[in-house]
Image (cartoon, rainbow, N blue to C red):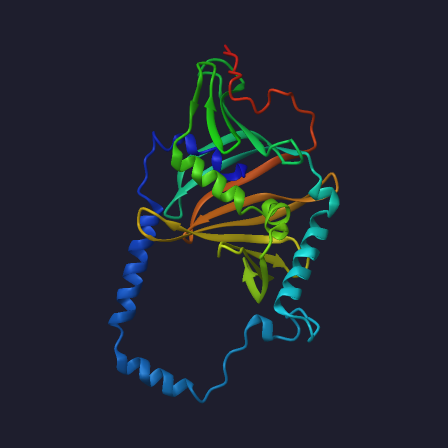
């Protein structure tokens, strides 16, 4: 979850036009373009191509398409792919991680173009287990001053128990509702939540949707559907069985349409025996919205009991 939160505290100072609105405008222009196409041209095109063989899809190419036993159902194939992905990630060792600490930098985009702001950060994410809640602490790293060398963490965000807090040496404030909703929406549709929550819930359906491509890599697409019609889709690398893309949609209450959130994972490195993506790119309605690069990753680090306590203020640094 760290790959997008390090820029949220800039939103009030750098307001941007809603990406959802941009998505609606693009969709409107595209729809109008389709309606403006002459009906006669469409009819001629259909008649011309009706007798031609259809172009093969990736799944239809024998040398590229993964093979599945003919007697397996879509759900059986989908669950097998999820089992393979879990094994590739590290199996029980991945499931039983206590926490992860990452160092890196992140940039934000507007309408697919960088906005010029890059933030260095360090983040610690604790995974839920028993009485240990899921929580995250993100520290934003800035220069001490124009005259003093070195850097310091002077702003921290803490996410715990469905709340979000911004902490400095001056105090603790609650983050805006839309940021909190966005954070926990993505947490609820994360790869961790798929294995820890979704697949254990009654009535869940897993569907193998066949082959597709993600950044020129052949992948197998699997959709997990809950009993309340919520869904999350994974594109799994055919060669490595590692996740390449995670996608979900939700209803935008402002514009009364559907928004899409997607994350792509690349540049995998094996850290403490666990394959870890060092590049995470996020898309909103098809537009790149942020890109995060990790420079260092650690698993199961020792944490202070106050790590995720938003009432513990930062110490003022000179």
For the question of whether residue 218 can be seen, the reply is: no
Quadrant position of residue 172: top left
Q: Position of residue 209 (x, y in %)?
A: 56, 66
Picture residue at 47% right of the left edge, 14% below the top: 169
Residue sitting farthest toward the front: 202
Report which quarter residue 222 is drawn in: bottom right
Q: Residue at x 72, y 52 (%)?
A: 87
Residue 54: where, in percent of width, then height?
50, 81
- Can see residue 92? yes
Judged left or right of residue 251, residue 131 is: right
Q: Is residue 78 above or below residue 63?
A: above
Q: Position of residue 112 (x, y in %)?
A: 40, 48
Please tell me which residue lies in front, 216 or 174: 174
Vertical comparison of 52 with 86: above or below: below
Report the quarter where the N terminus lies: top right
Q: Name the residue located 47 percent from the left edge and 87 percent from the top edge.
A: 52
Query: For the point 48% across and 33% down, which residue is it?
Result: 6
């Amino acid at each position: 979850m760290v790959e997008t939160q390090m820029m949220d505290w800039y939103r009030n100072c750098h307001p941007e036009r809603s990406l959802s609105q941009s998505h609606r405008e693009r969709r409107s222009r595209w729809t109008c373009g389709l309606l403006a196409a002459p009906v006669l041209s469409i009819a001629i095109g259909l008649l011309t191509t009706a007798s031609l063989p259809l172009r093969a899809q990736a799944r239809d190419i024998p040398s590229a398409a993964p093979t599945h036993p003919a007697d397996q159902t879509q759900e059986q194939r989908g669950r097998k792919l999820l089992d393979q992905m879990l094994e590739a990630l590290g199996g029980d060792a991945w499931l039983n991680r206590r926490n992860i600490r990452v160092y890196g930098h992140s940039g934000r985009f507007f309408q697919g173009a960088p906005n010029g702001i890059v933030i260095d950060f360090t983040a610690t994410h604790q995974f839920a287990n028993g009485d240990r809640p899921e929580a995250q602490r993100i520290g934003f790293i800035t220069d001490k001053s124009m005259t003093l060398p070195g850097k310091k963490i002077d702003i921290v965000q803490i996410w715990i128990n469905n709340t979000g807090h911004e902490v400095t040496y001056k105090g603790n404030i609650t983050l805006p509702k839309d940021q909190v909703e966005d954070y926990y929406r993505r947490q609820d549709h994360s790869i961790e939540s798929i294995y820890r929550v979704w697949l254990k819930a009654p009535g869940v359906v897993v569907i193998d949707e066949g082959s597709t491509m993600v950044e020129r890599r052949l992948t197998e697409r699997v959709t997990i559907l809950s009993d309340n019609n919520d869904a999350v889709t994974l594109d799994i690398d055919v060669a490595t069985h590692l996740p390449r893309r995670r996608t979900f949609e939700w209803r935008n209450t402002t514009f009364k349409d559907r928004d899409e959130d997607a994350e792509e994972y690349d540049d995998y490195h094996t850290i403490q025996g666990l394959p870890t993506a060092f590049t995470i790119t996020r898309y909103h309605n098809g537009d790149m919205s942020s890109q995060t690069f990790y420079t260092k990753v650690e698993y199961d680090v020792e944490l202070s009991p106050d790590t995720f306590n938003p009432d513990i203020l930062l110490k003022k640094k000179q």
